[in-house]
Amino acid sequence: MCSCELCQRRTGAPVHIGAWFPIENVKIEGVTTAFTRTTGDMGMEATFHFCPVCGTSLWWGGRSTGFLAGKIGIAGGCFADKDFPPPTHAFYDKRRHSWINPPEETQCFQEVPPPEVMAEFMK
């Protein structure tokens, strides 16, 4: 889960929820509109894919190197599953709206976690 201002603006929500998967385990179908930007504090380039009809944020990926290599992120809301698992990590907790409370077991970071935590998280 991410509460950074870039995710808030991209999703139009106070918090972004996403799930990461190995790209070989994901099949993308249909047409999307893509937007690439260099993301905030991490300085990482990421491409976000949206539905060209309704604008829903669908999936995203980054460069083919670093901890994002071979991974694809999918917006949690796309699963439309009330039993979707809770977030394991929360980024930019310092920007989280005061009325949003992550589950107790969620590891929270004020900003971006250190590289060793990101590497473990992305396994």
Image (cartoon, rainbow, N blue to C red):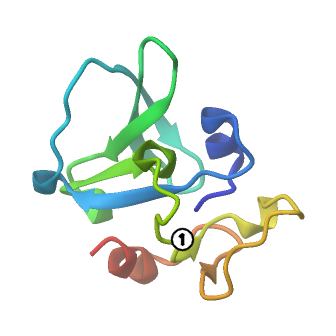
Q: Residue at x 88, y 63 (%)?
A: 99
Residue 103 coordinates in the image, percent (x, y): 67, 79
Residue 28 coordinates in the image, percent (x, y): 20, 35
Q: Residue 109 vs residue 66: left or right?
A: right
Give the structural element (helix, strand or loop) at label 1.
loop
Q: Residue 32 vs residue 42: left or right?
A: left
Which quadrant is the N terminus positioned in?
A: bottom right
Q: Picture quarter containing residue 71?
A: bottom left
Q: Residues within 10 Å of mark 1 (few under 14, many from 20)?
A: some
Residue 68 coordinates in the image, percent (x, y): 30, 58
The answer to whether 61 is drawn above or below residue 115 in the figure is above
Q: Nearer the viewer, residue 121 or 77?
A: 77
Q: Residue at x 37, y 41 (%)?
A: 60
Q: Residue furthest bottom?
A: 105
Q: Residue at x 51, y 17 (%)?
A: 54
The answer to whether 14 is drawn above or below residue 102 in the figure is above
The answer to whether 37 is drawn above or below residue 113 in the figure is above
Q: Which residue is mark 1?
A: 87
